[in-house]
Amino acid sequence: MAKMKPDAHPSKDTETEGNTPQLSDLGEYKDPAGNPTYLIDSAGKVDWYTWRGYKKYMANCMQCHGPDGLGSSFAPNLTDQLTALSYYDFAGIVVSGQQNKWNPSGNSVMPAWGDDPNVMCSMDAIYTYLRARADGVVGRGEPKRIANNKEAQDAEYKCLGF
Ligand code: HEC
């Protein structure tokens, strides 16, 4: 079982340990350290989670972090930041929020999403999309998906209580 250094960047670990994503029951790809990751085919199409992550990012994060994760005047560029954040760091910030790291004004507030199922039910998908953006393998705009994934979509809806 591959181990990850506490603050190692998951993508770098993926490179050193061989980029062989493993399929979970719901068609979610994981790197050898167990972090969610993307799959891209030779035509540039992405797995369902990465595509879904784009949609969920646009619905919940884009108004502050800008289209395609590129940042705004008041929230950081997440395609930069994901090169420095592990999945666990990322999830911790998204669940609990963060304040004033980027601007000590007292007004630099990342909301806590821990009580919002629209974000919590799609944490892996949002991370996977931003990771693909940070690694430079997915461009701007909506990526094309390789295929629909009914099981994963049903699991998301169930999590949301539909
Ligand atoms: C209301 C505006 C707003 C929304 C919506 C928002 N964020 Fe943030 N986010 C911020 C601000 C502002 C910061 C910088 C906080 C600070 O200075 O510590 C931030 C910081 C972050 C960070 C930490 C970056 C770092 O390296 O310190 C992550 C990760 C993040 N946001 C992810 C998300 C995700 C994912 C979503 C959607 C689910 C989201 N944010 C939605 C405003 C927002």
Image: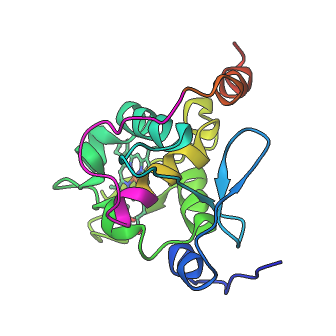
Q: Nearer the viewer, residue 66 or 115?
A: 66
Tell me what residue is drawn at x 26 percent, y 66 percent. Answer: 105
| Count of numbered badges drawn on the protein | 0
Asked if residue 18 lies left or right of residue 127, the reply is: right
Q: What residue lies at 64% left-to-right and 82% top-to-bottom?
A: 17
Residue at 40% x, 39% y is 54
Does the magenta portion include 145? yes
Rendering coords of residue 41 (x, y %): 45, 50
Residue 143: percent from left, percent from top: 35, 39
Is residue 60 found inside the magenta-colored segment of the image?
Answer: no
Which quarter of the frame holds ligand 1? bottom left
Q: What stretch is highlighted in magenta?
A: 131-147
Q: Main secondary structure of the magenta part?
A: loop
Q: Which of 20 and 36 is in front in this view?
A: 20
The one nearer the camera, 107 or 56, is 56
Visible in this render: residue 100? no
134 to the left or right of 15: left
* Quadrant of res 114: top right
Question: Relative to residue 94, is residue 156 depicted above or below?
Answer: above
Horizontal placement of 146 versus 157: left or right?
left
